Image (cartoon, coloured by chain):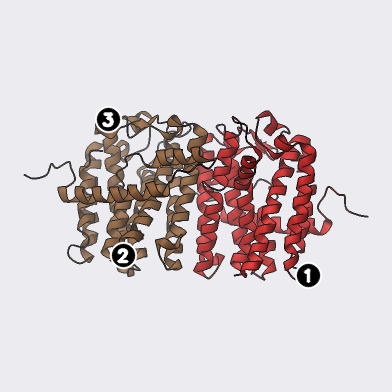
Chain colours: A red, B brown
Amino acid sequence: MAPSPRQASPELQQVMDECREKINKTLEKMLTKGDWAEAPLWDAMRYGVLNGGKRLRPFLVMQGAKIFGVDEYRARRVGVAVELLHSYSLIHDDLPAMDDADTRRGKPSVHKAYDEATAILAGDALLTLAFEVLSAPETHEDPRVRIELVSELASAAGGHGMVGGQMLDLLGEQEEFDIGTISRLQRLKTGKLIAFCCEAGAILGKANPAHRQALRNYAHDLGMAFQMTDDLLDITGNPAEMGKDAGKDEDAGKATFVSAMGVEAAQSRAQMLCQQAKSHLKIFDYGRADMLHHVADYVLQRRV
Amino acid sequence: MAPSPRQASPELQQVMDECREKINKTLEKMLTKGDWAEAPLWDAMRYGVLNGGKRLRPFLVMQGAKIFGVDEYRARRVGVAVELLHSYSLIHDDLPAMDDADTRRGKPSVHKAYDEATAILAGDALLTLAFEVLSAPETHEDPRVRIELVSELASAAGGHGMVGGQMLDLLGEQEEFDIGTISRLQRLKTGKLIAFCCEAGAILGKANPAHRQALRNYAHDLGMAFQMTDDLLDITGNPAEMGKDAGKDEDAGKATFVSAMGVEAAQSRAQMLCQQAKSHLKIFDYGRADMLHHVADYVLQRRV
């Protein structure tokens, strides 16, 4: 029987589950409990990170690294750093002054489970920890590799990256953005971090420029498709499955691809982008990039 | 005429002024204006950073680096990274959910001049930018030096560093801390970043372990003295000179050295610590650490 068109293929699902398990174990180890006086901060960090996330970003890191035969432990450390950073961004995005979201994946958001001050600090500490993890020798024995990872992640996550995108997201509630600005918003808010994930394996594996560029191109198209399906899910998704309210972006008057181009055009554009994403993977030997191939189909078909 | 006992010596003042000028120029260059859509974020970042700060932390970096003959431009880049990070911490500390401070150095704090969401994001972006600056090749040609700077700064600033200290600061408003926990609070909140500043020159200059340890010891004592004088100024300072309200920590029921040991004991302990800080500098050749010597006197005598 063919897999449901709206689910990950059984093979992809299994590899993603395995990856999630490994990442969660490493995260749990890293966010240890202790009897230090600042323990409540670390409790909130753990709560914000170990929250049932899909770990799609670490999955991209690990699959990209696999193409170049990178040691799995190293790829996992980079995946963990990305997930720490991604978790910080969700904690801060949920704050009352930002998206004011009371729940995240069906559970109280960090500022609801703890308080606002603790949530701000937990985010700050997770962002900082991401760079601490990347800079440690366990991540890679070559300091040139580690410093390139730090540099690329900082650039992807900063004021002309993810944080800049979140700023645009907030500004988009007040002004009408043209499609060019919406594209910039999405590229900054989610695209650049996804690009980092896909390129990280090439950095770890010291890949040649053509291979690195192929992954960058793949990431660009995948990231755009991911954002479009995110916007579509906000309109068409099932709140119970998603663990958050549907229509929240629309209610907030957010600037999204769907609001700018309509549901059907966004759907067909997402489809086209996923095809294009997969075409960039042809440069790799047979089988090496299979999972990245599957993940492009998955992004198109995901329900949550 | 001898300099007023409560002012920096004219020589120190001149060197500090020169340092401040250089740091401000580099910061202004780095926080460029542009017509990108996310410009409001960068406006808030600039506002939060270019606010008349004394730039004491970059001064420590540059004076430490001078001992080892490090190129001034490199030391300045590290000083700038520290100041970006320090500025982020002030912006987040001032937020309504944290210290709820409407003013900073006599001007509206960032969330008052802009709004809360922008202030949170400006802080996030400045923290990220600090790591981007350190990781760039202009900071040092040796990637081992750059990655060590990243690693040490992340550790000093994170959940068992500055952010952990801020968490303790907030917890201290609700619970009575013993002197041991207050020491931990201060070491984390301000001590570790000051230690990084003093050690950064040793990292840049690939100093021998004994020299690096001497700077670490100096930083430890200086940092404690700095925090004690900060607490003392909160009680005895002149609000007009400080640009913030005196007695604010006391009103908030914050756990400070002064609340735990009283004004006089804190004064004499700060004095003792500054003496001790200076004694660690004896290892350096005559004249090399003069400014660090002076700065210990300055910390004891500062009024703002």
Q: Quadrant of the N terminus of chain A?
A: bottom right
Q: Chain of mark 1?
A: A
Instruction: Residue A102 in the image: state x and y as whole percent.
Output: 63, 33
- Measure the C-alpha gap from mark 3 to mark 2: 39 Å
- Measure the C-alpha gap from mark 3 to mark 1: 71 Å
A204 shown above or below B294: below
Q: Between A182 and B57, which is closer to the camera in this rendering?
A: A182
First of labels 3, 2 by sequence position: 2
Residue assigned mark 1: A286
Residue assigned mark 3: B239
Residue beneath the point at 32% across and 38% down: B260
The secondary structure type at the circle numbered 1 is loop
Amino acid at the residue labelled 3:
Pro
- Measure the C-alpha gap from mark 1 to mark 2: 51 Å
B251 shown above or below B211: above
A136 relative to A254 in the view: left or right: left
Instruction: Residue B262 in the image: state x and y as whole percent.
Output: 26, 37
Q: Chain of mark 2?
A: B
The answer, for residue A36, to whether it is visible in the render is no
Amino acid at the residue labelled 1:
Tyr
B144 relative to A290 in the view: left or right: left
Residue assigned mark 2: B70
Residue beneath the point at 28% across and 66% down: B69
Q: Are marks 3 and 2 in contact (CB under 8 Å)?
A: no
Q: Between B39 and B211, which is closer to the camera in this rendering?
A: B39
Instruction: Residue A109 in the image: state x and y as whole percent.
Output: 62, 37
The secondary structure type at the circle numbered 2 is loop
Q: Chain of mark 3?
A: B
B81 shown above or below B138: above
